[in-house]
Amino acid sequence: MKNDQTVAPYGTWASPISAADVYANSNSVGTIRGGAAGIYWLESRAEEGGRMAVVGIDAGGPVRILTPEGFNVRTRVHEYGGAAYLVHGDTVYFSNFSDQRLYRQQAGGVPEALTPESGSDLRYGDCIMDEARGRLICVREDHRAAGEAVNTLVSIDLATGGEGEVLFEGTDFVLSPRVAPDGNSLVWVAWQHPNMPWDDVALYAAHFSDDGALLDTRMIADGSRGSVSQPMFSPDGVLYFLANWSGWWNLYRWTGNDAENVRAEAVEMGGVNGFGARYFAFIDGENVVLVKQEGGYSQLAHLNLTTGDMQDIGSRFAHAGGIVNLDGTLWLEAGTETTPNSIYRLNQDFSLEQIYVPAHTVIADEVISIPSAITFPTGQGEIVHGFFYAPSNPDYVGPSDSKPLLLVRVHGGPTGSAEAVVRSDIQYWTSRGFAVLDVNYRGSTGFGRAYMERLDLQWGVYDVEDVVSGAAWLAEQGLVDFDRLVIRGGSAGGFTVLEALSQHDIFAAGTSYYGISDLSALARDTHKFESRYLDQLIGPYPAARDVYFARSAINHVDRITVPLLLLQGLEDRVVPPNQSQKIFAALKAKGIPTAYIPFVGEGHGFRKPENNIRALQSELAFYGLIFGFVPAGNLPALQLENAD
C-alpha cells in the first residue's frame, strides 16, 4: 500500500473511466484494404452513433473519412456481415446498411448505387474486382422467395449495374472468391448445412469462359478433412490457403493434384473462416507474413514458402489480423494490453510502426490492469484458458480483511474467444475495485481444433462447468471473494450466464445481455447462417428436443435463486424480447431481486452509445444494490423488483 492511497471497499473506488468514456469516446478499426491512392480501413464512429465509415490515408495526405454521412458501410449477409467494401484504384465500392445496396464512390465524388432497390432482400458482401471483365464478383444473399435465403456468387457489371448474374449456386453458403493473377480462373470456398465455416468447408475452382461464365467448376478439396479458409494466389499464381486439417490452422499450397502443408506445426496460423479474414499476406512469391495464435496472444511471423523456415517478427500482440500488401509494404490492425486495435505498417526490414490510433479512452498506465494468462482445472481432467484482471487504481486499495468481487465475463459465439487487448469496458470494472475473469471455455477458438470441438453436443454443459471452475479456482487461490462471484455475458455468453445460474449456486448474481434462454425457439426461428449451428452444439432438432428443453433456462426459471439483471433490445431477431420478459416475470413472482431494461430500436447487440452507457451504469448500480455498497459517481436509478 502506498502512503497516499485511500482504503475503500472494493466496488466503491472512484474511477477515471466513465461509462461515456467506454462507449461515447471510443472508435474501432478493422478490414484494411489497399488502393492506388493509399491504405483504407473501416472505422466505427462512436460520435456518429456507431456508423461504419471507410477511412484512409492517401499518399502523403492526412487521415480522412471517405464515405459521407448518411452512409453506413455494413452488410447483412449471414446477418453478422463483414467484408462490406473494397477499394480498386481510386474508387470505393461498399454495401450500405439501411438499404443493403452496393454503391460506387469515386475519389472526390458522391456514392452512386450499382444495385437496384430491393427492400434489403438482396444483400452483397465479400466483393472482389474482376478487372479483365469490368465487373465485381460478390457473395449475394437473396431473401426474395419464401423459405431460406439463397447464397450465390454473382457478377455485377460496372457499366450497367443490376442485381447480378449468378456464376455459382447450389451450396448453402459461399465465401472468399479470389481471381487468379492472370485473370483466367477463380477460386472460392463453400459449405452445406449443418456445417459452420470452421467445419467441413470445401474449396472450389473454375476457369472463365470468353463471356465470363465459369467453366470446369470443380471441388479441389471436398471438406471431408475439415475447413478451408482465406484462399489466396501468390504473385506468381500459386494457390495457398489456410486449413485446419491437422488439428491446427496451418498454411497449405495447392500442387495441382493435392495440397501440401507448408509448415506443419501445432499452432494456429490464422483463425476461423469469416468474411474478409486476412491472416496472411505475401511479401513475394516465396515469402509470407502470417499471424500465429498461441495461448490467447498473436505473434507476427515470417514464413519462407520454399524452405518452411519461420521466424517471429517483433513482440507479441494481444490481437493481430487484417494483413494486406500495398506496393510491397504490409499493413495490419493490431492491439496490445495497453493500446487498442490500431493501424500498423510493417516495413520491408520488418520494423513495425503504429500509424493510426482511433479515438479512444486514454487510460493512464498506472490505472490499466494488465491481464495474466491463466489456466485452471475443470471437469474430465481437462485444462481451461482465461485472462485474469486484478483490481487496479493507484488512488485506492481494498481493506486488508476483504477480497475483491469477481466478475466472470463470458464471450459470445460460442465459437469465439476472449483476447487480452486493452478494453475500456473491462478497465471500467477493475478501476472500481472489481476483479475480472475473461474465460476461454472449451469451445473457444485459438487453442486448436480439438479444444474448439470439445463443445460439440456439450453447449450448456462444458462452458458452464468451465466458468464455474474458473471462479472457484480463483477463490481457492485467495484472489477473490468466494461469496461475491458474479457472472455476465451477452448472446451466447448470456446463455451460459442463465444456464450457470439455473444449474449452480456458486454465483451470487448475474447479468444477461440479450441472453439465449430458449434453444428450441432459436433452432426454429433463427436466421439461415446459424439455423443448423445447434445440430453441432446440442443435437439435431427436433430429434434432440428433450436435450433442447433441458438446457433452456426459460423452462427452469424456478432454479434461478439469485438476483438477475436482464438487458434486452426490442428489435432483437435472434433472442425475441419475450424470452427475457418471461424470465423477468417469473423471478419477480418468486420474490427474487430482478430488473429488466428494454432498449427501443436495438437488436441483437446494442450499437447506440447512449444505450450502452445506460446498460453499463445500470449494471454497476445493480451490483451495488445487491452487495450493499454505494458505487462512486452519479448513476441512473435502477428499478429493482423485490429489492427488500
Image (cartoon, rainbow, N blue to C red):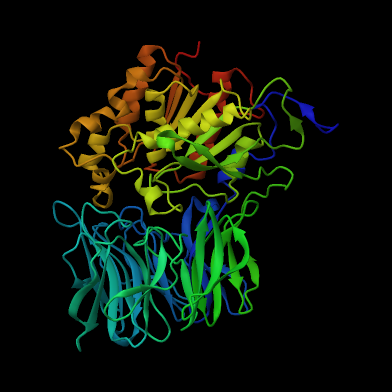
Instruction: Report the residue at 30% width, 26% height from top.
Output: 554
Quadrant (top left/top right/bottom left/bottom right) for the N terminus: top right
Would you say residue 385 is visible in this rendering? yes
> Residue 145, relative to residue 68: is it above or below?
above
Q: Position of residue 617 (x, y in %)?
A: 56, 32
Please, which residue is most extreme toward the right here? 3
Q: Which quarter of the figure has residue 110? A: bottom left
Quadrant of residue 489 in the image? top left
Nearer-the-camera pick, 262 or 283: 262
Which residue is rendered at x = 76% and y = 37% of the image? 394
Residue 46 is situated, as x and y percent measured from the top left of the image, at: 53, 51
61 sits left or right of 525 in the view:
right
Would residue 568 be visible to someone looking at this image? no
Position of 548 compared to 428: left or right?
A: left
Q: Nearer the viewer, residue 319 or 263?
A: 263
Count of marks placed on residues: 0
Residue found at the far front of this picture: 381
Q: Position of residue 537 (x, y in %)?
A: 29, 42
Q: Nearer the viewer, residue 566 or 460?
A: 460
Identify the residue at horizontal 50%, vertical 21% (top origin). Answer: 508
Q: Position of residue 133 (x, y in %)?
A: 29, 85
